[in-house]
Image (cartoon, rainbow, N blue to C red):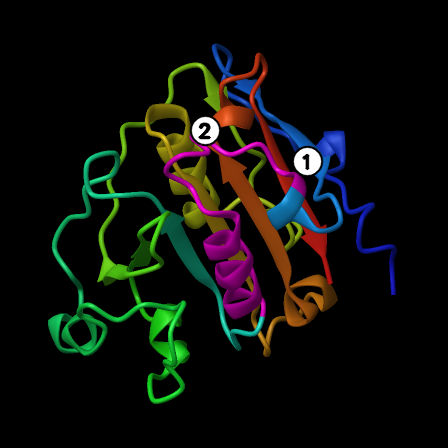
């Protein structure tokens, strides 16, 4: 197994359009909930981030979770309103063992309030504007790119948020995808030039 903090993107896999530049990948630091720069310390709770990280990395399949309030990121229609209703007013900071976290792997994304941990949406549609300046590597090797990380990048470029993208496919032909990896985007890291994001391979 490779060093979980040395996962990188081969430069040969980067295919950026002529007018776009690839963002930089950094290794996810140990204890990320304690050390990552967050958009607003008065709004974003490190305890909420730590709980979301724990929940996401236990999921059996891929998911995207946006940590942001309704003012900063507005979620669109729910792909599955029944599932969304099950999570109405539920907080991940309280006893929620009666809830099925595999719901987070369903089509769409999850939104969690950054201060109190209340789940604002499940199976929601996030439709940020594309970036004309920055891009991500394509998913040629089963280990990079994909629609969720593009959504995460665009959201973090345009809004105050933290976005976690969990990639795991038990039946994938790629060992990396079967083990799973986590990509983390923050508006603070995306504000750099070039933007940065963090990744760890399990």
Q: Residue at x 38, y 31 (%)?
A: 154
Residue placed most toward the observer, 44 or 106: 44
- Residue 145: percent from left, percent from top: 54, 44
Q: Is residue 71 left or right of residue 37?
A: left
User: Split into 4 quadrants, where in the image is the C terminus?
Assistant: bottom right
Q: Is residue 26 left or right of residue 48?
A: right
Spatial separation of the CA atoms under disc 2 and disc 1: 25 Å
- When asked about the image quadrant of residue 112, the answer is bottom left
- Residue 152: percent from left, percent from top: 42, 41
- When asked about the image quadrant of residue 155, the answer is top left
Secondary element at tag 1? helix
Q: Is residue 26 above or below residue 59?
A: above
Q: Is residue 167 above or below residue 80?
A: above
Q: Is residue 93 above or below residue 8?
A: below
- Residue identifier under label 2: 187
Q: Residue at x 59, y 77 (%)?
A: 170
Magenta extent: 35-57
Q: Is residue 176 above or below residue 90?
A: above
Residue placed most toward the observer, 170 or 18: 170
- Residue 83: percent from left, percent from top: 20, 76
- Residue 16: percent from left, percent from top: 55, 23
- Residue identifier under label 1: 13
Local crowd size for mark 2, using a 10 Å CA cut-off: few (<14), some (14–19), many (≥20) = many
Residue placed most toward the observer, 114 or 107: 114
């Amino acid at each position: 197994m490779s060093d979980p903090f040395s996962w990188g993107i081969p430069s040969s896999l980067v295919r950026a359009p002529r007018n776009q530049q690839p963002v930089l990948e950094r290794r996810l630091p140990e204890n990320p909930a304690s050390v990552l720069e967050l958009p607003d310390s008065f709004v974003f709770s490190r305890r909420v981030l730590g709980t979301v990280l724990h929940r996401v990395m236990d999921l059996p399949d891929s998911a995207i979770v946006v940590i942001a309030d309704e003012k900063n990121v507005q979620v669109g229609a729910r792909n599955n309103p029944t599932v969304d209703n099950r999570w109405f007013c539920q907080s991940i900071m309280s006893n929620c063992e009666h809830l099925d976290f595999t719901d987070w792997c369903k089509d769409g994304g999850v939104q969690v309030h950054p201060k109190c941990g209340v789940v604002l949406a499940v199976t929601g549609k996030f439709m940020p504007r594309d970036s004309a300046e920055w891009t991500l590597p394509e998913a040629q090797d089963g280990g990079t790119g994909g629609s969720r990380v593009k959504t995460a990048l665009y959201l973090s470029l345009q809004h105050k948020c933290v976005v976690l993208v969990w990639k795991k496919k038990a039946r994938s032909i790629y060992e990396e995808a079967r083990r799973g990896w986590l990509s983390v985007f923050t508006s603070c890291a995306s504000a750099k030039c070039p933007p940065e994001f963090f990744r760890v391979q399990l």
